[in-house]
Image: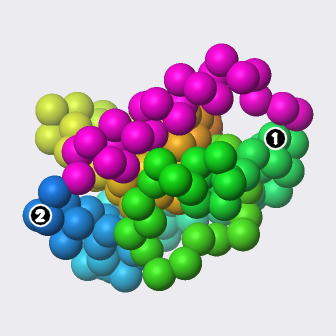
């Protein structure tokens, strides 16, 4: 499936704003770290420990729901959507190369639309938000979406995705996280911990 030229042109312009116009030495040092899985290991460990300490008998079910959410997001995004669109990454597109700065050591050979990083992190954020909000309130969980947005922004900033890639990934991920969170709440609502 081909991206329409007008959409490609808009996306390329937005890409240059993030990748080139927003560039500064501080972002160059910090933002690439947002996209590395290892950067977020402490957060994943925190969520694991939090679940085990606070969710009682439902902790392992919640952890399983979290893993299922990420697995579904990763599979749907990587195997279905990317294969359908086959959009080249900006760092692999000869038309874009003169207009980008690559801030990672190499450009993946995979397709660009939608961003798996964005999809997976927004799926995680939405699942945690939907399942924990009944217990802890929404106002304490908004930071999850800021975290996922930082990961998505980094993908564009370093030059490996277009803005529409991460936006599409965010929508896919939030949809998956909302569905898995909804089914988790129907079967094992945390508000009724016992």
| Figure quadrant of residue 74 | bottom right
* Disc 1 packing (10 Å; few <14; some 14–19; many ≥20): some
Q: For residue 124, which numbered disc appears in the image?
A: none
Whether residue 82 is visible to the viewer of this picture, yes or no, is yes
Q: Secondary structure at mark 2?
A: helix
Say few, some or many: other residues with alpha carbon within 10 Å of mark 2 (under 14 / 14 to 19 / 20 or more).
few
Give percent across and percent down for residue 46. 25, 73
Residue highlighted by disc 2: 26
Q: Which residue is mark 1?
A: 85
In the rendered image, residue 8 lying in the magenta stretch gets the answer yes
Residues 143 and 7: in front is 7
Magenta extent:
1-23
The residue drawn where x is 44% and y is 66% is: 102
Residue at the far top: name it. Answer: 6
Which of 57/141 is in front?
Answer: 141
Q: Secondary structure at mark 1?
A: helix
Residue 42 vertical placement versus 51 (above, below): below
Q: Residue at (76%, 29%) from the top-left corner?
A: 3
In the rendered image, which quarter contains the C terminus?
Answer: bottom left
Q: Give the CA separation, mark 2 to mark 1.
A: 34 Å
Residue 39 location, quadrant: bottom left
């Amino acid at each position: 499936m081909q991206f329409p030229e007008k959409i490609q042109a808009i996306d390329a312009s937005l890409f240059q704003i993030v990748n080139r116009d927003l560039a500064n030495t501080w972002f160059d040092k910090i933002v690439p770290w947002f996209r590395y899985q290892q950067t977020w290991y402490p957060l994943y460990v925190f969520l694991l420990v939090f679940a085990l300490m606070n969710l009682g008998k439902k902790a392992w079910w919640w952890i399983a729901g979290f893993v299922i959410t990420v697995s579904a997001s990763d599979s749907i995004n990587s195997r279905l959507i990317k294969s359908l669109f086959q959009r080249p990454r900006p760092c692999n597109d000869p038309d874009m190369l003169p207009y980008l700065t690559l801030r990672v050591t190499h450009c993946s050979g995979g397709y660009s639309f939608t961003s798996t990083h964005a999809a997976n992190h927004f799926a995680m954020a939405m699942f945690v938000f939907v399942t924990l909000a009944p217990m802890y309130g929404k106002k304490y969980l908004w930071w999850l979406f800021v975290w996922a947005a930082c990961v998505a922004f980094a993908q564009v900033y370093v030059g490996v995705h277009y803005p529409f890639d991460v936006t599409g990934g965010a929508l896919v991920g939030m949809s998956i996280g909302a569905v898995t969170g909804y089914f988790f709440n129907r079967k094992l609502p945390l508000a009724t911990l016992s």
